[in-house]
Image: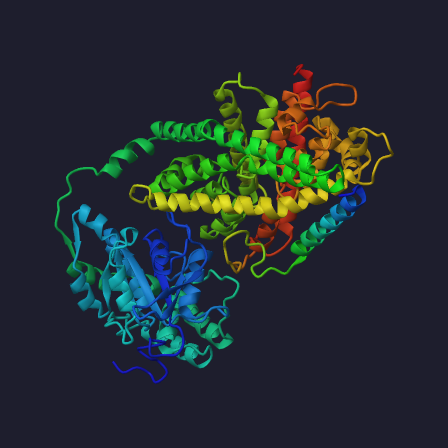
Amino acid sequence: MSAELQTLLALAVVALAAVWLVRRAFAKKKHPGCGSGCACPAPKFTPPSR
Amino acid sequence: MALPSHISANPAGPSSSRTPVYALVGNPNCGKSTLFNALTGLKQKVGNYPGVTVEKKVGTAYSQHGQPITVIDLPGAYSLAARSPDEAVTRDVLLGRRADTAQPDRILCIIDATNLERNLYLVHQILDLGRPVILVVNMMDLAAASGVTVRINRLEQELGIPVIACEAVNGKGLIELKVAMSRPDLPLARHAWDIPAAIAPAVAELQASLVANDRKAPFIARAEALLLLTDQDSVRVSGSTPLHARTEEILRAWQKRWEGEGTDWAGTLVNSRYDAIGRIAADTILQTGTSAGPTISDKIDSVVTHPVWGWATLGAVMTLLFLSIFTLAEYPMNLIDAQMAALGDWVKNAMAPGDLRDLITSGAIGGVGGGIIFLPQILILFFFIGLLESTGYMARAAFIMDRLMSRVGLNGKSFIPLLSSYACAIPGIMATRTIEDQKDRLVTILVAPLMSCSARLPVYLLMIAALVPGDRVPVATKVGIMVLMYALGTLGAFGFAWLFKRTLLKGAPPLMIMELPPYRLPRVKDVALHMLERAWIFLRRAGTVILGISIVLWFLSAYPKATEGATEQQQLAQSFAGRAGHALEPVIKPLGFDWQIGIGLITSFAAREVFVSTMGVVFNAEAKDDDTTPLRQAMAAAKWPDGRPLFTPLVCITLMVFYVFAMQCISTIAVVKRETNGWKWPLFQIAYMTGTAWLVCFIVFQTGTALGF
């Protein structure tokens, strides 16, 4: 495989990875912020009064 | 008793076309999740301490005819009068208050045979709901061992509902339970208890309003009216449907009237219920054996909860844990290391030099391999955590820690969330839902990420390896450094809790009431499942997020390309990543860190373990084409431009201290934002933790330098 073709393929892989990471970061999650293995609607939090 | 026209004694029974929905409820730590797993075949986490489940889980079981049955596992609750957010989820699902969950057709109520009378309080409230109920009396073996016989037939006659004797852990009683769940004609309870006459008009008026204005079924409305009038129904969670204004108005009017009269109607209601329960218990519980002094659990507890021996036991357990991490994991770690190096060499031999080859070897293999080498140690950590949870020792550790925690103003219930945070701060923060007091809950959320999570483990291990390379270093030294880091995080959490409780979130020192579960032999299957689940999560992260970041990081460290003839060091320095690291260097140089470490600090903001893969990419980028120098050796050889070694023992310690305190985890920030309903507290958390990290590191490095280290 030529060096030019390697560069082209490497940049394509990088672009794919970057797009995937960005999409993952901004995707609207089904259960946002739940981490792994849990489905959780958040309990309402009432800020405590000082 | 005739039922109102819209209530069926057979909601969604097998003759119905829709899948019947069972809610699984019971007191904390009575075996709900074990039964849920046995019925559905799922692998919901189980543990021998209260508060393992803090959110509802849904699974599918099958009737004896193969028809699907939906089962909802609800968090444990002692009563429907919720005192914490997790109990409120149970209450709301059962009362049909949740917009996102349909009211269950039938209820599977599980009780602990060794604590029947106390468990019957919740059963009594559930029978008020007028839904078909199956009662599962679990832990019959433990009850028998303690000389207690539960008369199942008598209980069935008293309540008028199916009662199944069960040992969920051993799978006993499951067939009978599935047969009962498959019945199309589950009877309604013969449930009689006298509501005090003076309170009856209030119950009736509220019930009428709940039926007319809140569209509740009469039985549910009556049960809800009783709860509202006991004045212990103040915990609200999102997803709950609010009460109609007219219902609120009636409630306030009655409460005001009773306050004026100075009568404790709530107490009268509770006492009336306990009288009814007492009559049932007297009829169904037989003490067949006599207590022959302290049990084995009592004897063990006299040591592990002792003011002196308890601490010694806790210290010994922690030391054993870390000792195992360093000794047992060595062989598999070396194996993974060698396989990764061999894979890198194979790729280098198979491909011509070029960007794609560099991407695969330095980016993908260097980055991901640098992380997964720590998999054996993570498995050992979770094996020990699983073992301690399933035996019941965790609750004892909470008891021991309570004295210390109450001194800093932390709620005793904070222990389980803080302990969970040693694995990962996310479940730890979610576990704070068991804490009733909002201020205590917030303090625990704020300090939980200071507990050293498993993502920090690879960073600590790499730094310890760089700090004390070679085989001549005694394992005790490595264990000592590791224990020191864990202790530093724990003391930091306690220190900040003390500070917050005296400044931002002032409140009275809370009391801890926690049930000590009986000791049980650990179930190998549960421990193994827990361990494998965590391993899968770690590998999935390594194969997705860490791989993605490593690939992008390779690009950032390889581009823009340096001019022909530039060294690897010069290439890295003028790359995008190098420029970012250089931009950060003035801020981190007083801590002893250079721009290369700066790159790691930036990328590991996504997740702490990314630091290791970043170091893999950064330092493998410096290696020669034909050399896949192991990361630890490459780091040990790294130097400042003036030739001084970069990773001195002092820098390694300072870097570990930085990771003890810094808030380097996007997922945790997202969970804190969700649990506190806003950005205020997560931003505060980032600021105080990262600020502390910088300050402590500055003190450590500058003091160490002044002392000649």
Q: Is residue B648 visible?
A: yes
Looking at the image, residue B63 lies above or below residue B49: below
Q: From the viewer's perspective, is B704 left or right of B120?
A: right
**Residue appearing at x 73%, y 42% in the figure:** B356
| Front-lying residue, B478 or B547 | B547
Q: From the viewer's perspective, is B673 left or right of B36?
A: right
**Residue appearing at x 39%, y 74% in the figure:** B221
x%, y% of residue B611?
Answer: 64, 37
| Front-lying residue, B261 or B185 | B185
Q: How is the image coloured?
A: rainbow
Looking at the image, how many numbered discs can be counted on the residues?
Answer: 0
x%, y% of residue B518?
Answer: 29, 43
x%, y% of residue B133?
Answer: 30, 68
**Residue appearing at x 60%, y 33% in the figure:** B342
| Front-lying residue, B96 or B258 | B96
Q: Quadrant of the C terminus of chain B?
A: top right
Looking at the image, residue A49 lies above or below residue B341: below
Extreme residue in the bottom direction: B5
Extreme residue in the top direction: B708
Looking at the image, residue B292 lies above or below residue B31: above
**Residue appearing at x 20%, y 59% in the figure:** B281
Q: From the viewer's perspective, is A37 left or right of B649?
A: left
Q: Is residue B263 visible?
A: no
| Front-lying residue, B579 or B89 | B579
Q: Quadrant of the N terminus of chain B?
A: bottom left
Extreme residue in the right direction: B563
Q: From the viewer's perspective, is B19 left or right of B674?
A: left
State which quadrant residue B132 falls in.
bottom left
